[in-house]
Image (spheres, grey):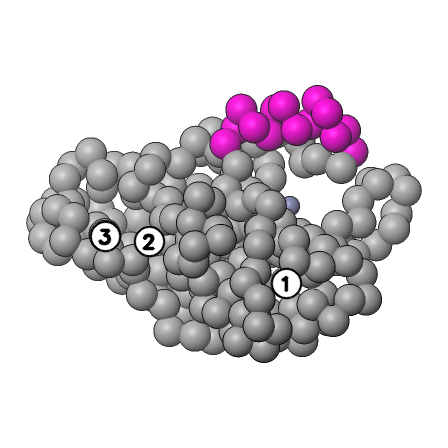
Amino acid sequence: MALNGRFPDTMLAHLGWPEADHLRLRPDAAASITRLAAAFEAHFGKPLYLSDAYRTYATQVSLKATKGVFAATPGTSNHGWGIAIDAASRVNVDGSAEHRWFEANARPYGWINPAWAQDYNSNNGQHEPWHWEYSAARDTHPTSAPAQEDDMPTTQEIHDTVVSILRASEFFGTAGAPGAAVKRIAAQVLESKVSNDTGTLAQTVRDTRRIARRHELADYPDS
Ligand SMILES: [Zn+2]
């Protein structure tokens, strides 16, 4: 859990539209929400505003102090894994046209409003129509690494960072931890890349995700 909220800048990408480019997510999630925001704007004729995306560990600590049960235990939030957004623009309002549009359209982009954020269970106190989470396994659109990563050389330091992040079970954004096969294969791919020192960081991440996703889908059918 040590990496939650402590991603290095190289593992985060700014969102790709003006109203949200001050916020960051894991690069595949950033690319996907940018596509979804474009579809939202095309439909409603107004941009999508977000109130939050990636959250540092320090921010999680301060939110927990002020919001109590409405904030995740620091170090466990999907905001800290760079795969969660809090939407505004009335997506945050139950029953609004904007919320219903997200419910009808976000899933094929990889985004859902998870079950815990829909109930009114007073034991967890959480009802968050604004909170949406990304899974690459759900994303039906082709993913591509952001341009700024494409020419980045694969240094040992960057690779070591990628290896450690990929080994964190939450990295793949599944509901549960990825199977042992996924982690083993991801580690093998990355270690062979490190020892050969070929390719770029973006290519390494793409290769690993593609392989991991294939095994992940076999291990965890997205029902
Ligand atoms: Zn949230």
Q: Is residue 60 magenta?
A: yes
**Which residue in the structure is indicated by mark 1?**
112
Query: Residue, x 39% and y 57% (percent of image)?
Result: 16
Query: Residue, x 22% and y 46% (percent of image)?
Result: 191
Query: Residue, x 70% and y 22% (percent of image)?
Result: 65
Relative to 9, does residue 83 appear above or below in the rendering?
Answer: below
Mark 3 and mark 1: Cα distance apart in space = 28 Å
**Which residue in the structure is indicated by mark 3?**
148
Within 10 Å of the Cα at label 2, are there few (<14), some (14-19), or many (20+) other Cα atoms? many
Side of 135 where 149 appears, left or right = left
**Image x and y of residue 138, in percent:** 53, 69
**Image x and y of residue 130, in percent:** 69, 53
Observer-nearest of 169 and 53: 53
Mark 3 sits near ligand 1, with its Cβ under 8 Å away: no
Marks 2,3: beta carbons within 8 A: no
- Mark 1: which amino acid? Ile
Mark sitting earlier along the chain (2/3)? 3
The answer to whether residue 26 shows anywhere in this view is no
Relative to 80, does residue 25 appear above or below in the rendering?
Answer: below
**Image x and y of residue 70, in percent:** 76, 37
State which quadrant residue 69 falls in: top right
State which quadrant residue 87 falls in: bottom right
- Mark 3: which amino acid? Gln
Observer-nearest of 33 and 81: 33
**Which residue in the structure is indicated by mark 2?**
186
Mark 1 sits near ligand 1, with its Cβ under 8 Å away: no
